[in-house]
Amino acid sequence: MIEFDPLVLSRMQFAANITFHIIFPTITIALGWVLLFFKLRYNATKDEAWLQSYFFFTKVFALSFAIGAVSGVTMSFQFGTNWPGFMNTVGNVAGPLLAYEVMSAFFLEATFLGVMLFGFSRVPGWVHTLATFLVAIGTTLSAFWIIVLNSWMHTPAGYEMIANDAGVMQAHVTNWLAVIFNPSMPYRLAHMLLASGLTVSFLIAGLSAYRYLHGDRTAAVIKPLHTGLLLAAILMPLQFVAGDAQGLNTKAHQPAKLAAMESAWQTRHDLPLVLFGIPNEDTHHTDYAIEIPYLGSIILTHSLHGEVKGLNEFPQHPPVKPLFFGFRLMVGIGMLMLLSAWYGAYSVMRRKVLPKPYLYLLVAMTFAGVMATLTGWYVTEMGRQPWLVHGVLKTSEALGPVSGNMVFSTLLSYVAVYVFLLIAFVSTLFYMARKAAQKNARYNATMLASRVEKNRNNFLHGEVLVDC
Amino acid sequence: MQIDWLAYIFAFLMVFSILMYTILDGYDLGVGLLLKNANWYEKDRMIASIGPFWDANETWLILGVGLLLVAFPIAHGVILTHLYLPVALMLFGLIFRGVAFDFRAKVDAKQKWRWNAKFFYGSLLATLSQGYMLGSYITGFDASWAGTLFACLVAVALVSAYSLIGACWLIMKCEGELQFKAVTWAKHYLLNAIVCLVAVTVVTPSVSSRIFEKWFSFPAIIALLPIPITTVLLAIALYMVLRHMPLPKDRYAWLPFALTIAIYIFSFAGLAYSFFPFIVPEKLTIVEAAASSESLFVILIGAIVLLPILLVYTVFSYYVFHGKATALRYD
């Protein structure tokens, strides 16, 4: 019988859990605010189209929230089942942060979600708007606490290590403000919130384009489509700025991670930007590299001759290949998102009709934000290895006494469940979009028929479709 | 520096959260378990009655486990590594139950029955696993066949207990034919629950001699008698009430649910007494397992400020959706 390594399997299991989980908060964090925007537009204009947009995307929100909630529960158990060493060592930091997340955010969002989803006809309009606002606040607050903890694991601050009675070194907080506002927290929070905004703009644009292509050209489709494109066009450049700032921050605090992302082996003052290549860990060389001279130094230090430390300077460094390729994949998707968002926003501003191939592209890019977010998280989290908490606790030291076979069986089950749910999620979203499109198309048809009787010319002119 | 009373406060908060969970998500899971006895129309109405609440209800589990994690990190590790498999099964159950809420309302109508089935089996799996975990916990994670058998007995007992509170919830939230059915279910599962509760109560002292000592030593037994006696009286009262349900003009429709909550509270108090002062039975006491006082203090400040607010808006949401359940609509 093969003995499975519980460390590798537990890491894979945690990766599977968090990969699956993060998709849904990434959607709900920003979608909450977009829903509030739809609701406020409706309050201001009394235009039914905004309300229809609101109702359609609350369904998307509800589905995402439910999957995010149940997969989040899984996470809170994993700490104990697979990684008891984590809480044993840094529990004094992680504990209060997690407790504040549950008490300040989870209950808020979960409770007002009920009012937001099903309370429209039961409470006054302003209470319903307030509930929408509180749900958005809740999801964002929850993201804040989690990012605080995650960034503290990358750049710990405000603590000291003291041995307990059993001789185990444990972190004790000396300054909570330093813990919360640890060096990388603001950058990570900004990067993640923008990622959420972009994920949602492409989700909205993609689903709306899908409805449009299915013959639904009502304002309830056009409005969210335009909202998604304009939001993406505004947020995308901001995201590049935020990403650049986080890169500088990583260079200051986790130089080995940065060197691995760039596949920079030697310390250089004229680092080229490697567009493509294959990092070779045996020869410490980047094979088949296509490089642009000096651009690496310019991007990473904002000066022509800035020094960038190479991997050779670090006795231990994270795996190079996944970071190198993961980072390029993320930036590549980001570039594609930037171009498509700007093209779309430009067309919208100039009141041009969006061509069909572009709409198909938007449908294909419905989950582009999710992909970019996931690859980004892979880069930063694998870049922290071999540490679980940078400089404090190694991943291997946190593992609990679980057998490899046990973890293997649960890992397989989790993966099976997650793949099934992902397929169900994606197909249900598009099914909902199709159903809404068909309903509106029928509505359009009856509207058309009545107009035809009134004014046949109008129908022949072909303008009606766009107007109703 | 270690302050004992902080550890006890957190033990109380944790037990409170788990009690809230077993009551609130208990009725959710109970309704899920009762789905198998209902027709398709009743299924819609039953799920509609818990739709606005389930998400917040499940959050009590996160708070309970979260408090165990942050206030008693060593105990969290010991308990959850012992319960690795039932925890995983419970999570699968909760995942399917939770997502079925939303999928069943959004997928193609032809697919709906599949998600209804997942709702039922998810609820069943989660309930059985929770019961098994409780049973295993009572025996101090005794992995022998006797310990396993006892854990299975508690698992079955919890199915009855959740079905009972689920049925009482439906009596309160439903009307007409479904309400009649719910009364029948409540009577049926009350009897089941009593049989199970008696069995568990009788067997518990024999699987744990320490618990036996705690209950049957003199004079403790006299001070403790009110707990089982009140529980029995409440159960009898509940049965009497159920025999006359539903009353004209739907009066006292809330009473069975309230009585069941009272039974839950007394059973919980009995359990809590059995374990005190241990947090991992026979191995770790509450004080031994507690996290450092400084971090507990930080959490306590948050709890003092946030928990009352939380309870207020929980009451608000129950107020918004009070009365008989209607079909869930987004608009």
Image (cartoon, grey):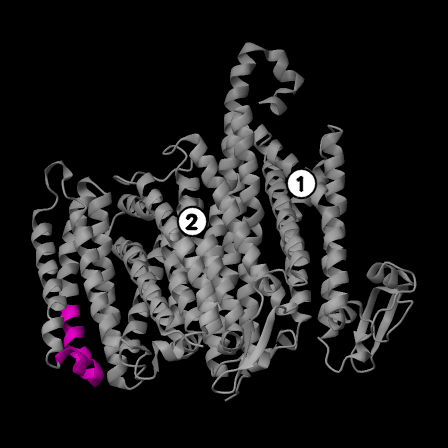
Quadrant in which the C terminus of chain A appears: top right
Identify the residue at horizontal 54%, vertical 58% (top origin).
A145
As drawn, the label of residue A373 is none
**Horizontally, is A329 left or right of A104 in the view?**
right
Residue indicated by mark 1: A231
- Is residue A278 depicted above or below B188 in this figure? below
Chain holding disc 1:
A
Give the structural element (helix, strand or loop) at label 1: helix
Mark 2 and mark 1: Cα distance apart in space: 28 Å
Give the structural element (helix, strand or loop) at label 2: helix
Q: Which amino acid type is shown beneath numbered disc 2?
A: Asp
Q: Please provide percent x and percent y for residue B199.
A: 15, 73
Q: Please provide percent x and percent y for residue A38.
A: 55, 34
Q: Nearer the viewer, mark 2 or mark 1?
A: 1
Which corner quadrant of the image does residue B321 belong to?
A: top left
**Horizontally, is A321 left or right of B305 in the view?**
right
Q: Crowdedness of circle 2 by 10 Å Cα count: few (<14), some, many (20+)?
A: many
> Main structural element of the magenta stretch: helix, strand or loop?
helix
| Most foreground residue, A147 or A400 | A147
Give the residues drawn in magenta, as a range. Answer: B195-216
- Is residue A390 depicted above or below A340 in this figure? below
**Horizontally, is A12 left or right of B263 in the view?**
right
Q: Which amino acid type is shown beneath numbered disc 1?
A: Leu
Identify the residue at horizontal 84%, vertical 62% (top origin).
A301
Residue indicated by mark 2: B102
**Horizontally, is A249 left or right of B48 in the view?**
right
| Most foreground residue, B135 or A422 | B135
Q: Please provide percent x and percent y for residue A31.
A: 56, 45
